[in-house]
Amino acid sequence: MDFPNPVSRRRFLGGAAATAGILTLSPSELAAMIQGQGQAQAPRRTITEAEYDAIAKIGNNENCWGPPESVTQAMIKAMKYGNRYGYPDGNIVQEIANHHGVKAENVLLGAGSGELLDVVGLTFLNPDKKVVGSDPSYGSVYQQATTIKTEAIRVPLLPDYRQDIPALIKATKLHYRETGFVYVCNPNNPTGQIIPKREMKKLVEELPEDMPILIDEAYHHFVDTSDYETSVPYVLEGRPVIIARTFSKIAALAGMRLGYVITTPEIARKMRAHQTGTVNAVVKWGGVAALKDTAAMESVKKKTIALREATVRDLKGLGYESIPSHGNFFMVHIKRPVVPVIDAFRAKGIIVGRPFPPMLEHLRVSIGTEEEMGRFSKAFREIFTTTSAAGSKG
């Protein structure tokens, strides 16, 4: 697969010095800087703007194109409220409610869906209550369980990397008295696999009727199959379901932090008691604009899918199979330990996904710009050609 490369020699050389600075960082330091980690132990120095801009950032499942003009302008206009507490917020909660056909009392805002996943943990977990979920999946929920001094009951994925719904139901029933809630990510991160709608229905209907179910739909907007549907209707049925959504992905507001859950009024009230109210004025207006700009969101979806499928085809042509994905990322089976490969990409100024145990021969790759995917494709060939040649000589 050939990608057009709009990078001029001048731009490339201008970024070379910045990339050289990046290469002095250890893998853990660079990961901490780029992936928002390292709170417990700060890196030795802060990454510069030039260094950051020189990196191909395809490791965090972000929207590489940035917010659409409608969202940017809405946030610029909202800056006039930056010095106020009680400010107009674009009626963001009601707009979200209208968007999903629910009531405002079913909606709870958060500073990104990550905050809300933590709040679910604070609401339903304690040292005597655990979370049941698939493994691997988005690890924040399980990390929060550890913070609360409890643990996760992790159910392995099936051999084809789908989530094992019968096993999740069985584990929950077996540990019913010690389970605080069940967690599924749909589509799942890091695999990109969906839970088909008939299997989701089975999960909701066969779990104990009072068992809360947290369904993370962060990548909902990238799904392109009729075998999937949102679980919002289960909330309307009055079931104890919590749907988590984010503006970080399709709307490109990862750095601005805005997410929400749709759930029953009772659960929303319980969760609200654990919140700090940290959503800022500017991003609320950006969220309203994003909900209305459906054309921009559809454009991002189409570009993302096209680049994802083109890259997957390219890798398949090289002999490397990828897990079918419905997200803005994919996992490729590289047939060798992933950590050295992650480091090899880093040495070329490309940040790919972190390891996801136990899938330690799979590399998660986020979809970046056409230029970034071109850099990835070129680097992949170089890394795997070099290591294959070295192996054959031995």
Image (tube, rainbow, N blue to C red):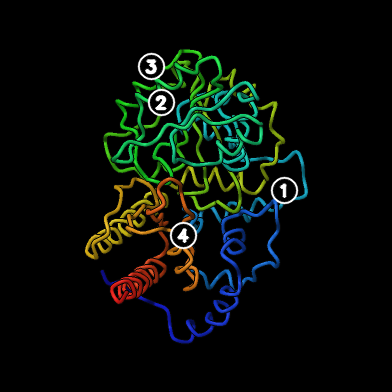
Q: Which of marks 2 and 1 is nearer the N terminus?
A: 1
Question: Residue 168, labelled with which disc?
Answer: 2
Residue highlighted by disc 4: 339
Which is more foreground, mark 3 or mark 2?
A: 2
Mark 2, mark 1: which one is toward the viewer? 2
Secondary element type, mark 4: helix
Task: Tell whether 237 sits left or right of 166.
Answer: right
Q: Is mark 1 on a helix, strand or loop?
A: helix
Cβ atoms under marks 1 and 4 closer than 8 Å: no
For the residues carrying marks 4 and 3, which lies nearer the camera in this image?
4
Type of the residue with mark 1: Tyr
Q: What residue type is labelled 3?
A: Glu
Give the residue displayed 41% in from the left and 49% down from the top: 297
- Under circle 2, the secondary element is helix
Q: Residue 205 carries which label?
A: 3
Q: Residue at x 59, y 35 (%)?
A: 116
Q: Real-space Cα distance between discs 1 and 4?
A: 45 Å
- Mark 3 lies on a secondary structure that is helix
Does residue 360 appear to the left or right of 22 in the view shown?
left
Identify whether 383 is placed above or below 337. Answer: below
Disc 1 versus disc 4: nearer the observer:
4
- First in sequence: mark 1 or mark 3? 1
Q: In this view, does 240 lie above or below 68?
A: above
Q: Gap in Å between the C-alphas at discs 2 and 1?
A: 46 Å
- Find disc 1 in the rendering and name its residue: 81
Q: How crowded is mark 2: few (under 14 residues within 10 Å), some or many (20 or more)?
A: many
In the rendered structure, which amino acid carries the disc numbered 4? Val
